[in-house]
Every structure is written in structure tokens, then in C-alpha cells.
Image (tube, rainbow, N blue to C red):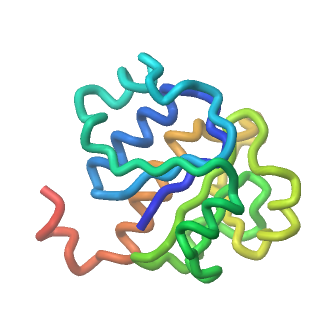
């Protein structure tokens, strides 16, 4: 399983997500325009001294990502407040790419038509909040995906 961030802008979010990925042996892929330098101190601070363990790939754009990763269309799962289906209904697999948009602008506009059938949302009771923090959303989805794909191994593999 892999986590993909499209155009991430806030270094501490990416650092927190990297830390969650490290904790679960998940690769982190950054795609597109980054709102920070990969050497940013707040990025490293959020990842603490674990940063050296992150399995990280960076691609210039989504097309480059798809070509180099040779991703199967069935493995793409997108998470957005604009999703029509709920995240617990996503068809998680160990080969899934869990894809999240930018904190400030979400996904590029064409994603909402091109991938709408693969787009899932985390439900919220309150209408006051537009969205959850990106690192919180990633954590929710990552652990649910682990539960759905590895339920047999949870007690053995997770301490």
C-alpha cells in the first residue's frame, strides 16, 4: 500500500503523514508542486528523527507518477470532501494507492470528473467544518485500509 499526496503545501502535514507511513511500512509518494523544500525544518521536525526511514518518491506531475509507477487503474483510490461514496466502502487492497489532494485546493479540477467514481469521503456530522486536517484524514484512511486488508495479521504484526 502507498500514500500519494498531490501538490502538498504544508510541511508539518507532510511530516506527520511521513511518520504514520513509517510506522506502518508504507511508501510515501509526493506528486506535483510542493509548497516547501524537502529539506524544510518543519517537515523534518514533524517526522522527528524517523525521517531517515521514510520510503519516499517524488514525481513532477500525475502523468509522470502513473507512467513510472505503472499503476493499475483498479489500485487508485482518491479521498476528498467531494467524494460521493464513503471511505469505509472503498475497495482497499494491499496494492492500493491512497491518494489525497492539496490542503488548500484539493485535487486539480479535472480529477473531480476523471476519477469521481474512485473518490471517497470521510463523513462529518457538523457542517461548520469544511474538511479535516490532511494528516488526520490520511491517518484515518491508512488505519482503516490496514484493517480491511490485514485483519488476520493485526494482532501478530501490530504491537
Q: Nearer the viewer, residue 153 or 74?
A: 74
Answer left or right for 52 relative to 156. right
Question: Which image quadrant: the C terminus?
Answer: bottom left
Which quarter of the picture shows residue 151?
Answer: bottom left
| Above/below status of 150 relative to 133 | below
Total numbered labels: 0
Q: Position of residue 143 (x, y in %)?
A: 39, 59
Task: Point out residue 58 in the picture as x, y percentages from the top left corner.
Answer: 52, 47
Residue 129: x, y in percent? 72, 36
Q: Looking at the picture, how far across and down is residue 32, in whole percent?
A: 67, 45
The quadrant in which the N terminus is found is bottom left
| Residue 5 falls left or right of residue 57 | right
Q: Is residue 96 above or below residue 21?
A: below
Q: Quadrant of residue 133?
A: top right
Residue at the (63%, 69%) spot, across then down: 67
Instruction: Give the residue at x 42% y 17%.
Output: 41
Question: At x 42% / y 35%, what residue is drawn?
Answer: 16
The furthest residue to the top = 41
**Vertical side of 38 occupied by 54: above or below:** below
Say left or right for 47 vs 63.
Answer: left
Amino acid at each position: 500500500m502507498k500514500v500519494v499526496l498531490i501538490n502538498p503545501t504544508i510541511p508539518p502535514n507532510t511530516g506527520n503523514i511521513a511518520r504514520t507511513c513509517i510506522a506502518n511500512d508504507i511508501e510515501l509518494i509526493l506528486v506535483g508542486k510542493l509548497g516547501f523544500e524537502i529539506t524544510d525544518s518543519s517537515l523534518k521536525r514533524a517526522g522527528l528523527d524517523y525521517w531517515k526511514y521514510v520510503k519516499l518518491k517524488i514525481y513532477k506531475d500525475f502523468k509522470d507518477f502513473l507512467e513510472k509507477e505503472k499503476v493499475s487503474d483498479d489500485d487508485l483510490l482518491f479521498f476528498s470532501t467531494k467524494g460521493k461514496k464513503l471511505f469505509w466502502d472503498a475497495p482497499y487492497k494491499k496494492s492500493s494507492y491512497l491518494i489525497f489532494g492539496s490542503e488548500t485546493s484539493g485535487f486539480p479540477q479535472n480529477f473531480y470528473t476523471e476519477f469521481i467514481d474512485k473518490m471517497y469521503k470521510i463523513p462529518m456530522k457538523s457542517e461548520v467544518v469544511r474538511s479535516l486536517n490532511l494528516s488526520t484524514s490520511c491517518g484515518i484512511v491508512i488505519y482503516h485500509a490496514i484493517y480491511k486488508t490485514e485483519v488476520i495479521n493485526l494482532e501478530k504484526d501490530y504491537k
